[in-house]
Amino acid sequence: MLVNIILHNFLLKSVDKMVMMIFKFNYQFLTSVISYQLSVISYQGNKGSRAIGKSMTNFPPVSCLLSANYMNLDNFQVCDRDLSDDLLSRYLGVNSIAVDTETMGLIPGRDRLCLIQLCDPSGFVTAIRIFRGQTEAPNLKKVMEDERIEKVFHFARFDVAQLSQTFGIATQPIFCTKIASKLARTYTSSHGLKSLVQELEGIELDKTAQSSDWGNAVNLTPKQLSYAANDVRYLLSVRDKLIVMLQREERWELAQKCFSCIPIFTALDLQQYKDIFEH
C-alpha cells in the first residue's frame, strides 16, 4: 500500500514537470512567432511612410517602430531625413504649423541638429530624424520657406538658426511664443514652455528627456519621442491665447515687429556677433 502511494506521488510530480516543460516551450515558441509577425506587420505598414527616397537609410529597428505605435500612429508619425510627399502636401495645406528642434547642444555649428518636430492645427505631429552629415531636406525646406504658412516656435531664434545652419533654410514668417510671453505676461518672469503650457493650457509637461542623447536617431526612446511631440502639440493653442493678451494690452503690433527681426538676430548669432546693440 505504501509503495503504491509513493509511486502515485512520483508519477504525479513527473507529469506536472512534463506539463510545465511543454507549456513553457509552447509559450516561448508562440511568443517568438507573434513577435516576428508583429515586426513584419510593422515593417510593411510603415514601409510607405518611412521610405522617403533613394537617400533613405534602412528601416529603423522594430523597437523604434513600436515606440511610434506607443504614441498613437493616428496622430504621430516618424520620418527619416525629410518629409514624405504625402506629408509635404498635408503641411502645405495649412496656414500655420508649430515647429521645434532637438540638438546635441546649444551652439549652432558645434552641436548638430538631430530631430525636427512639426504639428498642424489638427494636432498631427511629425518627427523628422536627421542623420549625421545630412545637409538637405528639400520637402521640409519648401514648407519652412512658404510665406503663406506661419511657423510657430518657442524661442524661435535658436531653432531658426539650426535650420539655417544645417539646411540653408530661410524660415518665414515666424511667431515666437517666448517673445510673445515676455511682451504679454509681464506679471511673471517664467516664460519657459513648461510654465506657459501649464498656465494657458492647464497641462504639466514632462521635461525630463530634454537633456538626453538625441544623436542616436534610430534608437530614440518612447519617452524622448513623447517629449518631442509635446513640445509642439500645444504651441498653436498657446499662440492663440497670447495673441488675445497682446491685443488686449495693445502690444500686438510691437510683437509682430519683434518677430520680423528674428532672422537678423539669427544671422548675427551664426556669425558669432554678441551684444552688437550694446554701447
Image (cartoon, rainbow, N blue to C red):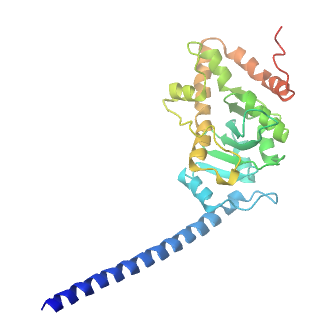
Residue closest to the far right: 271
Relative to 66, is 145 on the left or the right?
right
Q: Is residue 230 visible?
A: yes
Identify the residue at image location x=85%, y=27%. 267
Q: Position of residue 228 (x, y in %)?
A: 62, 41
> Is 23 displayed left or right of 164 in the figure?
left
Q: Farthest top residue?
A: 279
Count of labels in the image: 0
Most extreme residue toward the front is 2
Give the side of residue 255 with respect to residue 228, left or right. right
Q: Examine the rendering and report whether any part of residue 146 can be seen.
A: no
Above/below status of 36 relative to 278: below
Look at the picture and state if 192 lies above or below 245: below
Residue at 53%, 37% in the rendered image: 206
The C terminus appears in which quarter of the rendering?
top right
Task: Pick the residue in front: 21 or 247.
Answer: 21
Q: Position of residue 16 (x, y in %)?
A: 30, 80
Image quadrant assignment for residue 47: bottom right
* Residue that appears at 69% across and 37% down: 99
For the point 70% across and 18% down, which residue is it?
255
Identify the image quadrant of residue 26. bottom left
Above or below — where is 73 with respect to 96?
below
The quadrant the N terminus occupies is bottom left
Q: Position of residue 23 (x, y in %)?
A: 39, 77
5 or 207, which lies in front? 5
Q: Position of residue 12 (x, y in %)?
A: 25, 84
In the displayed structure, does residue 189 sit left or right of residue 258?
left
